[in-house]
Amino acid sequence: MKNINTITFDSIENIRDLGGYKTQNGKTIKYKKLIRSASLHTLSDKEQYILATYGIKNVIDFRDTKERLNEPDKIISNINYLFFPVFNNTRIPVVNKAFIQKMLSQQKLFSEFLSQEPQRMLEVYESLVFEESSTNAYREFFRTLLEVGKTDGAILFHCTAGKDRTGFASALILKCLGVDWDDIMADYLATNKYLQKRIEQTVSSFQLLNIDKQIIERASNCFLAQKEYLTTAFQTIDYKYGSFDNYLKELNITDKAIERLLELYTE
């Protein structure tokens, strides 16, 4: 597997270039074309400049309206911003200071939330395939890749933590381009390296409560990317559509479109 090409920012823990992955036809994904990220609401002026000079021309935001309004992306001149909400309401909790403070003040509710979280995350990944809003979002994602890929510059796509909705989008385009499944999974799981510090801080806050340690441990794992989550999403694709190729057709990705994507994003 290739080394993960991280773009180092103070304000974004989980941002990296998908360039460098080998495809099954012997090609390599181009650098500075496909960038996956967490949200951009805390970018400093210096980081905005770095993104602009890195060649970002389009930003795709997979968050819902409430998420986007609560933590709007910093707007960088000469970059086009596109809004493709995967879900119409918040399905994945944003584990930030406000969330932790709310949970700390409602211990019974919090204990119930933690115990239900493992199963709920599996359902979220099934919903990435089953829900119409999700299908529409990823259809628009691929349409944009085809339309703007012919120009110079990169596409950055993100949700909140850059883990679930963005992780699934990364897996879709990598698989479409012919990247080996082991590399796809490794890229998905690499998110944990970048979110580890935040999760450790969150767990420390949870441990202040009188909640079963096993529940906290199980729930903390849900805040990380898990192999079974992405596997569930692709098993759901097979269940609903019969194959990944059939799912791509649902996203309007024909054999001709795949050839075009290979031309645009590999070398």
Image (spheres, rainbow, N blue to C red):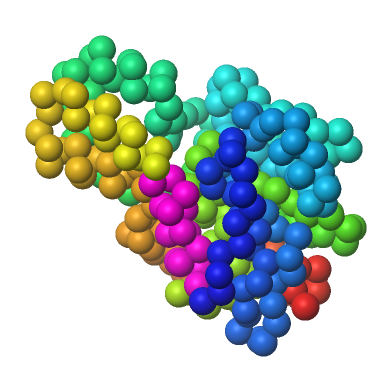
Residue 163 appears in the picture as rendered: yes
Name the one closer to the observer, 62 or 212. Answer: 212
Check residue 63 for magenta coloring.
no
Q: Quadrant of residue 175?
A: bottom right
Q: Residue at x 61, y 62 (%)?
A: 5
Q: Residue at x 38, y 46 (%)?
A: 196
Which quadrant, please, contains the C terminus?
bottom right
Q: Residue at x 88, y 58 (%)?
A: 152
Name the one closer to the observer, 129 or 250. Answer: 129
Q: Position of residue 142 (x, y in %)?
A: 70, 56
Which residue of the protein is positioned furthest toward the bottom in this rendering?
26
Check residue 190 for magenta coloring.
yes
Residue 245 appears in the picture as rendered: no
Range of magenta residues: 183-196
Q: Residue at x 35, y 55 (%)?
A: 226
* Residue 73 placement, left or right of 87: right
Q: Position of residue 257 (x, y in %)?
A: 76, 68
The prevailing secondary structure element of the residues shown in magenta is helix
Q: Is residue 221 above or below residue 63?
A: below
* Residue 145 placement, left or right of 107: right
Q: Is residue 256 above or below residue 155?
A: below
